[in-house]
Image: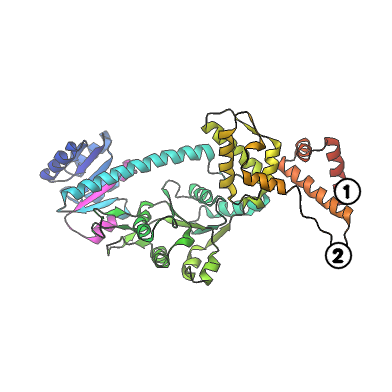
């Protein structure tokens, strides 16, 4: 049973909320002013607070502050008979979730309160899940690649700075995980992290999702709705695939970033926001600007801290790390004993270009774990695309320049490259490196010594 706490100095108003919401299955607590509310705060739990702005022994702002101090996650809705923008803005700045103007429509009150209680429950569940995920994964970007080191250094530096970050890179390279790491390491980590894919929603729906809307703003707008800019108050809003934003939405986004206020659809009221905006795209935004598909002023506004994530094929040292991580994840998820990849499977992984990057690798591992009946996963279960590319890599294109070539030198260079790669793949363990190359440990040491002497 959800509990509604109502503070109002009018007995008739308190009785109205008792009759209306107890009939709907709520438990209703009431207080006529600040002093009586203090006692309720100390001795009761509640899921939403509804307080009048003007009370005989104080104000709704006092009630709001007390509630946020005691229970910061509980939504607070302000009631006022004086439709003042200043009053509403003051309350919203202090953490109020919404406000109602007296006299109000009964159905509207029901919808507003039910929506906020439902949203609060979702946020609380999300926080629990995020804490669990943080504990299990600690939002760590799995990598030992040299090309990732400078990127991780940038992350450590900018996470605590309240500035805009733009992450670019191919789909599936881990852009959202990078953003979650930034949020998790920032002073805003206690606030919400809200992500929206700008290319996944129709233009009209995208605008109402981002900015919210007022009741009656369009057909079907039966009540006021808070947008994601407001919902992310105190936290981080991640605009994924920002390059897909329509031009007219780019204008509105630029204004929000500059003014730090948002206007709901159908409203003239400016609502202040306190959020960090981060963005990502797999498009070349410079090229989009040149072609007139993306606003230049918005590009420079969001491109304060640019980070370009390399594709998986450019950091193949991370493939075994990621493969082991996903193996453990899906074996646990499917309640299976921990499986191992046959060495030829790993060789195939190294030969494949992974156009879908980390996401494709994860999906492949999930498939292999689901389909493999035994403890060792063999190449038979690999997707056809990986089999084909692994097979084609064994017959590489060869050519001799017209000027001729030094075959011994070329073979030495190839051998050195394979020795170096095998050591990276095996974390420097020479016996494992020799096994990967299909040679004896003695031969491996001989070729390694020969390679070092020539270097």
On the question of residue 227 being in view, the answer is: yes
Q: Which residue is mark 2?
A: 402
Q: Which residue is mark 1?
A: 453
Does dot 1 land on a helix, a strand or a loop?
Answer: helix
Q: Residues within 10 Å of mark 2 (few under 14, many from 20)?
A: few
Numbered-mark total = 2
Q: Is residue 89 magenta?
A: yes
Q: Residue at x 18, y 44 (%)?
A: 33
Q: Position of residue 229 (x, y in %)?
A: 37, 56
Callout in the foreground (2, 1): 2
From the viewer's perspective, is 341 left or right of 110? right
In this view, 274 is above or below 177: below
Q: Specify start and end residues of the magenta stretch as a single range.
A: 68-90
Q: Residue at x 32, y 55 (%)?
A: 93
Q: Position of residue 220 (x, y in %)?
A: 26, 55
Q: Nearer the viewer, residue 62 or 298?
A: 298
From the viewer's perspective, is 434 left or right of 271? right
Q: Residue at x 56, y 44 (%)?
A: 140
- Quadrant showing the N terminus: top left
From the viewer's perspective, is 424 left or right of 360? right
Which of pointers 2 and 1 lies earlier in the amino acid sequence?
2
């Amino acid at each position: 049973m959800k509990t509604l706490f109502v503070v109002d100095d009018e007995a008739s108003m308190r009785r109205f909320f008792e009759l209306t919401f107890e009939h709907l299955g709520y438990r209703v607590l009431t207080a006529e002013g600040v002093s009586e509310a203090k006692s309720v705060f100390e001795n009761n739990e509640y899921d939403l607070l509804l307080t009048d702005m003007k009370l005989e022994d104080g104000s709704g702002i006092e009630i709001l502050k007390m509630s946020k101090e005691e229970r910061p996650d509980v939504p607070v809705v302000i009631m006022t008979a004086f439709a003042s923008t200043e009053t509403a803005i003051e309350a919203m700045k202090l953490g109020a979730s919404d406000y109602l103007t007296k006299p109000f429509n009964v159905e509207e009150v029901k919808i507003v309160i039910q929506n906020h209680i439902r949203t609060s429950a979702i946020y609380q569940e999300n926080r629990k899940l995020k804490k669990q995920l943080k504990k299990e994964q600690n939002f760590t970007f799995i990598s030992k690649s040299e090309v990732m080191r400078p990127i991780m250094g940038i992350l450590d530096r900018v996470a605590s700075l309240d500035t805009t970050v733009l992450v670019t890179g191919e789909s599936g390279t881990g852009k959202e995980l990078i953003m979650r790491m930034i949020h998790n390491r920032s002073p805003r980590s206690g606030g919400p992290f809200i992500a929206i894919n700008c290319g996944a929603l129709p233009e009209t729906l995208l605008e109402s999702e981002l900015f919210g809307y007022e009741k009656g703003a369009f057909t079907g707008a039966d009540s006021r709705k808070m947008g994601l800019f407001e919902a992310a108050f105190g936290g981080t809003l991640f605009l994924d695939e920002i390059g897909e934003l329509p031009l007219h939405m780019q204008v509105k986004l630029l204004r929000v970033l500059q003014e730090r206020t948002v206007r709901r659809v159908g409203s003239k009221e400016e609502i202040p926001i306190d959020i960090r905006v981060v963005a990502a795209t797999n498009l070349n935004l410079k090229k989009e600007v040149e072609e007139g598909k993306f606003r230049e002023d918005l590009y420079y506004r969001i491109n304060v801290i640019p980070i370009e994530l390399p594709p998986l094929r450019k950091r193949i040292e991370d493939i075994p790390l990621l493969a082991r991580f996903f193996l453990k994840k899906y074996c646990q998820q499917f309640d299976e004993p921990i499986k191992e990849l046959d060495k030829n499977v790993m060789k195939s992984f190294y030969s494949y270009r992974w156009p879908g990057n980390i996401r494709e690798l994860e999906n492949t591992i999930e498939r292999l774990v689901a389909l493999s009946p035994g403890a060792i996963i063999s190449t038979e279960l690999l997707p056809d695309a990986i089999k084909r590319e692994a097979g084609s890599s064994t017959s590489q294109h060869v050519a001799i320049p017209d000027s001729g070539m030094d075959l011994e030198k070329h073979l030495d260079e190839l051998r050195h490259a394979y020795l170096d790669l095998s050591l990276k793949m095996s974390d420097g363990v020479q016996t494992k490196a020799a096994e990967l190359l299909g040679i004896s440990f003695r031969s491996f040491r001989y070729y390694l010594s020969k390679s070092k002497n020539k270097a």
